[in-house]
Image (cartoon, grey):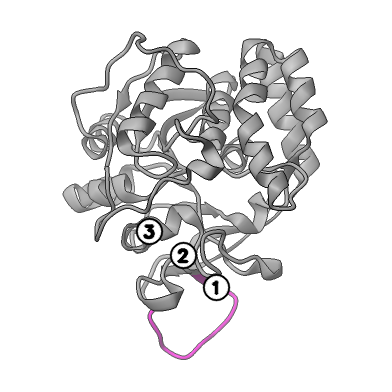
Amino acid sequence: MTVHKVIFDTDPGVDDAMALLFLHLSPQIDLVGVVTTFGNGTIDQTTRNALYLVDRFKMNVPVARGAGKPLVGEPMDPPDFVHGQNALGNVAIPESFEGKADPRPAYRFIIDTVRAAPGEITIVAVGRMTNLALALREAPDIVPLVKQIVVMGGAFGISGVLGNVTPAGEANILGDPEAADEIAAASWPITFVGLDVTQQTLMPTEYLSALAKDGGEAGQFIWEVSRFYEAFHQAGGVPSIFVHDSSAVAYLLQPDLFETRTGAVRVSTEGITRGMTVQKPDTTSYIPGPWDGRPSHRVCTTVDSEGLRRLYRDTVVNAA
């Protein structure tokens, strides 16, 4: 069994919390750190939420506070209509709990951890890419030392999928497109798990209810934290929750659930297409353009949704 050493770069966030538990409960994962970023909440909220989750589920891993704003400009307002006022679906969180953030900023934690274990660290990034961009700017020497990066982000237009904040932009990429374009310019191996596949997979109410029944404390928490999130989806005409961040974890654990294509990736940073992700497939020739000289990365194009749901359930229930 392959065991992956993982830094989880996250903005908890309901689906982030579900993905964090997925990582924590999987026997294939050695979670070596959690780093936070702004997005689903302010950086104060997301860091507090990460510390709470790590403490409650006894993960025994460091949490490093990350970027509170994008490389350029100010952050968008947190989507409290999606994730609730506390970014965790309005579930009750204690006023105080054990655990304090690592003294290092997230980008420094990433640099130090990668340098200490060259070729071993996978980064699963399910928020803004700001921490990764700052680490890359500070220490470009880490690029060949990173085993791989799995990004939940982007919408590549496969089967007509568009952005979920604007027609062009998916939230994690639109929240800091400069950072996303910078990390895609580096030659570390990146797989983008975008809306093209995350919106192919739903977790129905009865599926989540069964997790609450069979999945112990984690399963019950997943049910509780997803109530507000599910109501948002249903109000928008989606029958149950999309599986965004946990799809990135599923790719790491069982990549054969996905089909991918390779090619250079660019992110638009201007105008009405700001935040748009575009891949130039390796199999297609074009006139010279802004993709030239960029490294090839993987983009997920299809997913076995039933297999993904089964993997998630088995991971939670078997750990109960």
Amino acid carrying label 1: it is: Asp
- SS at badge 2: loop
Where residue 188 appears, as percent x and y from the top left, is 38, 53
At 43% across and 57% down in the image, what residue appears? 173
Image height check: is 300 above or below 263? above
Where residue 31 appears, as percent x and y from the top left, is 44, 24
Relative placement, left or right, of 3 versus 231 is left
Please give the residue where the numbered disc 1 appears in the rendered image.
Answer: 282
Amino acid carrying label 2: it is: Ser
Image height check: is 225 above or below 111? above
Amino acid carrying label 3: it is: Ala
Membership of 144 in magenta stretch = no
Q: Quadrant of residue 82?
A: top right
- SS at badge 3: helix
Relative placement, left or right, of 34 versus 13 is left
Question: CA–CA distance between discs 3 and 2?
Answer: 15 Å
Q: Which residues are magenta?
A: 278-291
Please give the residue where the numbered disc 2 appears in the rendered image.
Answer: 296
Front residue of this view, candidates 281 and 202: 202
Image height check: is 245 above or below 55? below
Please give the residue where the numbered disc 3 appears in the rendered image.
Answer: 180
